[in-house]
Image (spheres, helix red, strand yellow):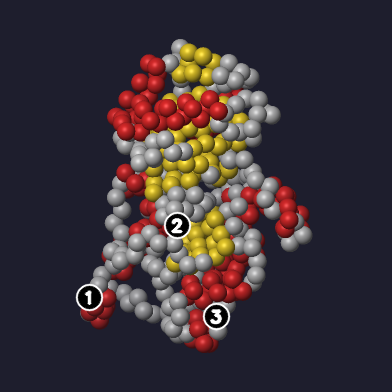
Amino acid sequence: MRRILWRANDWQTLKSRFEQASNREEGAFLLVRIGRAAAGARLLVQRVILPPEGALEIRGHDSLRPSAQWLSSVVGAAIDARCGLAFIHSHPNPNHPPELSPIDWETSITWSMSFVGMLDGPFASLVWSPQGVTGVMFAADGANVPLKIDRAESLGDRSAELLHPVEWRFEEERQLDDRQIKALTALGNNRLRDLEVALVGTGGTGSPLAEQLVRLGVARVLLIDPDVLDDSSNLRRVVGTRASDLGMSKAAVVGRHLESLGLTTRVSVLAEDVRHETAIRHLLDCDIVVSTTDTQSSRALLNQVAYQYWIPMIDVGVRVGTSRTGEISGMPVEIRTLLPENGCLWCRKQVLSSQTIYEENLPPEEREKLALEGYVQGFNRHQPSLAPLNYFASSSASLTLLRLYSGQSLPGVSTVFDAWEQYIQPLDAKIDPDCLCSTWRGKADDLAISFLPSRESFSQPSN
């Protein structure tokens, strides 16, 4: 899957320019960075370069030609920024299909053959019409081979807007979706049915969430979890488990259960630590990530990936609190939505702990030795867990996902729901200008990530 992604403010500036051009074509260049996925790519729009006065030699109802001087200028800007380059132009006629015309194709290939060898990234050619955004990209090893860009999105601090045309592919399943269509409308249901969701963690919260996603009918669910069902307490927590499953992979058992439902969602399983590059590259092929991981180091890596590659993420935290006298003091569920223009988990104070991350990444024998000496906490103790609370958390996450792709902005992006004390508390999610996230926001593959060593190649996860 190949995607192009804009920050919401940049997209609104560009869209306004197209709409104000009325019945004449308009165009702009884009500086883009690329993120490599297991089977596709993510193009991140870093800068929109609008045409200065006189930069368009020809501009009519169905024609547009940039000047040679402007072309030279934008190629130079891309080279200086060590970026790829894209050109997007408008087809203002609402009856014109949002597709490259024959002359667009010819020009795109000519430009690609000229530009790709000079750029530190791909060249892409895009078209906008009132029906949506479509286009192609050309890689360095195939400057004359167009690769379809499947999806286009605008991402803000509380919103995710799908820009590519809606494909009405699910009419034959209308009876299956009847009640859901009544709740979401046919358009909302189609948006949902087209989503590919990566789910990190398939335990007490992740497994009921996985089942909800399949029953909602998303296009694909990718399950990522390296753990096994190591003791009988998992049988009360993990959806789809049986006593005979003890010792098996959590992700594989949950995947088997989802397949047994006989519904339309494709289920992929990757029984691997998400801190390996293999897992992250597969994750980047998805539209959105939902994290229910219970380790700080995994959460910290996912946090960086979400902002470095502009992949929307919903992070779910669940806790059972007890007082010193042994009474329940609360059952907070925190839902944190990570989008390019809001604060990361480091910006949102008291979510991540550098000390805990350090301790989790120690070699097991060293960590055990230090734990016995009282220098680090133990990591093998079971945490309190309750199935109704896990279901509440998973439902809150799935409803947040629905709202995000509904066309409406989220009312909040970091919220605590306490099911025991029965209160809701919004939390601050502003960008901290001094946070380390400023060094990796939007950098994609231009910035290396420290992954755990992995023996795996980018083979496809099992289906």
Structural distance between the alpha carbons of marks 3 and 1:
33 Å
Q: Is residue 40 left or right of residue 159?
A: left
How many numbered callouts? 3
Q: Earlier in the sequence, mark 1 or mark 2?
A: 2
Place of residue 298 in the rendered image (x, y in percent of width and height, measured from the top left): 38, 63
Residue at the location (46% across, 29% down)?
A: 108
For disc 1, the marked residue is: 366
Mark 3 near mark 1, Cβ–Cβ under 8 Å? no
User: Dot 1 lies on which element?
Assistant: helix
Q: Earlier in the sequence, mark 3 or mark 2?
A: 3
Amino acid under disc 1: Glu
Mark 3 near mark 2, Cβ–Cβ under 8 Å? no
Q: Nearer the viewer, residue 37 or 203?
A: 37
Place of residue 135 in the rendered image (x, y in percent of width and height, measured from the top left): 52, 36
Residue 180, compared with residue 370, is above or below; it is: above
Amino acid under disc 2: Leu
Q: Visible in this render: residue 438?
A: no
Amino acid under disc 3: Thr
Task: Kindly indicate the quadrant of the structure image that contains residue 368.
Answer: bottom left
Using a 10 Å C-alpha cutoff, classify the residue at mark 3 as few (fewer than 14 neighbours), some (14 to 19) or many (20 or more): many
Residue at the location (65% across, 29% down)?
A: 96
Q: Is residue 308 left or right of residue 63?
A: left
For disc 3, the marked residue is: 241
Residue 326, compared with residue 191, is above or below; it is: below
User: Dot 2 lies on which element?
Assistant: helix
Structural distance between the alpha carbons of marks 3 and 2:
25 Å
Task: Kindly indicate the quadrant of the structure image that contains residue 408.
Answer: top right
The label shown at residue 283 is 2
